[in-house]
Each structure stands twice: as structure tokens, then as C-alpha cells.
Image: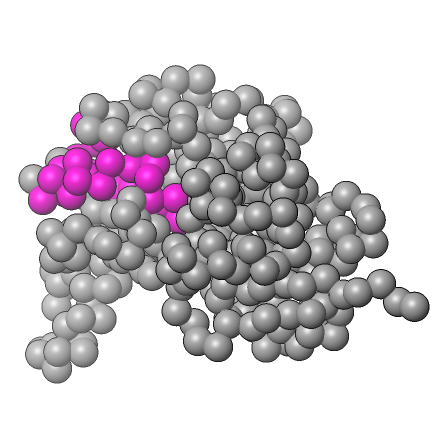
Amino acid sequence: MPAPRLSVVLTRRLPEVVETRMKELFDVELRENDIRMSRDELAAAMRRADVLVPCVTDPIDAALLAQAGDKLKLIANYGAGIDHIDVASARQRGVLVSNTPGVVTEDTADMTMALILGVTRRIPEGMALMQSGQWQGWSPTAFMGGRVGGRRLGILGMGRIGQAVARRARAFGMQVHYHNRRRLRPEIEAEVEATWWESLDQMVSRVDVLSINCPHTPSTFHLMNARRLKLMKPSAVIVNTSRGEVIDENALTRMIRAGEIAGAGLDVFEHGHEINPRLRELPNVVLLPHMGSATVEGRVEMGEKVIINIKTFADGHRPPDLVVPGVM
């Protein structure tokens, strides 16, 4: 007699091909709409599931995990970032946590370069004029931005995505600098022609573009605080496709409004979808709705990793993308 299939609850709609494959393998409860679950709905889902498949929009803390009961055995996160999950508390309760690293590297790096170009070449301002119907024709001095070739790019966080950004930036003729907890191996540094800075303060004060590519952890919360933002050159811009909490958003808004920073390109925000209204008003700021990994290919590959993690767990083995507390 075959073993009973695992009960799996999805908190959001996933690509159809992913949901179809999950239904073939597991006893899946799909989300009828694509509205994020309330805290009570999350708690109930965790009580009736063997496996929960949450997203970045689902904060799962110790208090919520305490309501899970004994049925839940795996949280198979749909996404690489896991700062919304209290992994240590989950493990203490015997609940494993997996994620989907690596599959969004190229997509996020593409979006980082798009934001760099968008801010430095003033693309949204030009689009807004065209959409308003008020364009009167070409002018020699209209919408003059800056050339990215020759500029110094500082990368904060030189993991997979940071290195992918560096490769793209070199193709555009940018000079690559980086700050990381650990210096890269010499051969990797040589490949992307990157200069390591042990001091983040010193790097920030010298670059023309700063790209945030580090995860959100207690040590990186407001890493770019008001003091550090003031070190940036008034002509510099900052781009963030990682986690909004790394930047003090209010301080950034004040400084851009005051002309102390030339502009910003943000795909993530400190308070989720609640964005400082003064930030939205600024013409030299490009805001995107967390689109960094939003490609068909990337989202399907994320789903495939989730399926592999659940299937491996169902077969009695360690999920290949198991998140281990203390190694994050």
C-alpha cells in the first residue's frame, strides 16, 4: 500500500506549471486568490499542513510557529531570502526550512543594471513626459543624464548576485569596487576586475553608484544609515534590489530631497509595500514593485526547487536547499 501523500499548503498563487506538478506529487491546497494570508490564516494553514510553502510576504515568527501544532514538518520557502522566517525557532520545534537559492541571480542582476541605467539616464522622467503628451521635440540640453562607462560602482555584498552585477558592470565599462564580510578569492576578483574595500565607509565615499546586494540580517539592518549615507558624494546614486531594511529609507528620502544624493533606484522598501509618500514624489527616484526576480523562467525554476525540496523530504532525505541556523 503506497504511503499517504504529504499535505502541502501554498500561501500564494504560483506559476500554473508549478501548481500542476505539485498536484501530481502531493495533496496540495492551492490559494484561490493571490491575496496574502492574514496572520490567522497562516496559523491555520500551519496546523493542517505537513509542508507550508510561503513567500517573502508571509512573516513567520516564533509566536506564529508556537501555534503550528505537531503536524508541520517542513517550511519550503518559495524564494531565496528567508529573513521573514524565524529559522532558529522553527528548528527548535522540529520544523525544517528550505529555500530556493541561485535561480534568480541573473534576473536580479539584470534588474540592478536596469535601475542603474534608469536613474543615471533619467529614463522614467523621459517616459513621464512622453506619456503626458507634452513633449515638444528634441532639445540639446533636455534630460541630460550621466554616462555609466568609467564610473565607479560599489557593490555592497559580493555573493552570487553581486558577482553577476559586477560582470554586467564591467561590460558597460564601469570600475568595480566591493565590500564583503570576506574578501573573494583572487581568481574571482581577477575575473570581474574588482577592488575590495575592507572599510565600507571608505568605499561608500568614493563610488559614483552604490548597489545593495547583501541580505537582511540583524547586522545589516540600516547598514546604510544616515551617517553612512552622508559619506556618499552628492553626485552619487544608490540602487537596491536586495532588501529594503538595509537602507534607512527616511534618511535616504531626506538626503535626496536636499540634493545630498543624486538619485536612487529601488526595487525593495523598508516597510514592504508601504512606501514613504515623499519618496514617490521625487523625479530622480525610480521605484519598482519588487520585480527583481519576476521572469517566467526564474519563477518556474523557483517552483521546481521547492518541489525538489519537498520530494526529497518526502523520500526521507535532507532537502538539498536546507537552511541551517547560524550559517545564514
**Residue 191 within the magenta-colored segment of the rendering:** no
Image-quadrant location for residue 93: top right
Image-quadrant location for residue 243: top left
Seen at 72% across and 68% down, the residue is 26
* Residue 285 vertical position relative to residue 5 in the rendered view, above or below: above
Image-quadrant location for residue 321: top right
Seen at 92% across and 68% down, the residue is 1
Of 102 and 111, nearer the camera is 102
Q: In the picture, which quadrant includes the C terminus?
A: top right
**Residue 235 within the magenta-colored segment of the rendering:** yes
In the rendering, at what x and y percent does residue 165 appear?
49, 45
Seen at 66% across and 56% down, the residue is 50
Of 325 and 1, nearer the camera is 1
Of 218 and 64, nearer the camera is 64
Seen at 88% across and 67% down, the residue is 2
Residue most extreme to the right:
1
Q: Is residue 202 visible?
A: yes
Instruction: Using residue 319 as the reference point, say whether residue 2 is left or right of it.
Output: right
In the rendering, at what x and y percent does residue 177 appear?
44, 31
In the rendering, at what x and y percent does residue 169 appear?
46, 45
Residue most extreme to the bottom:
133
Range drawn in magenta = 229-257
Q: Is residue 301 visible?
A: no
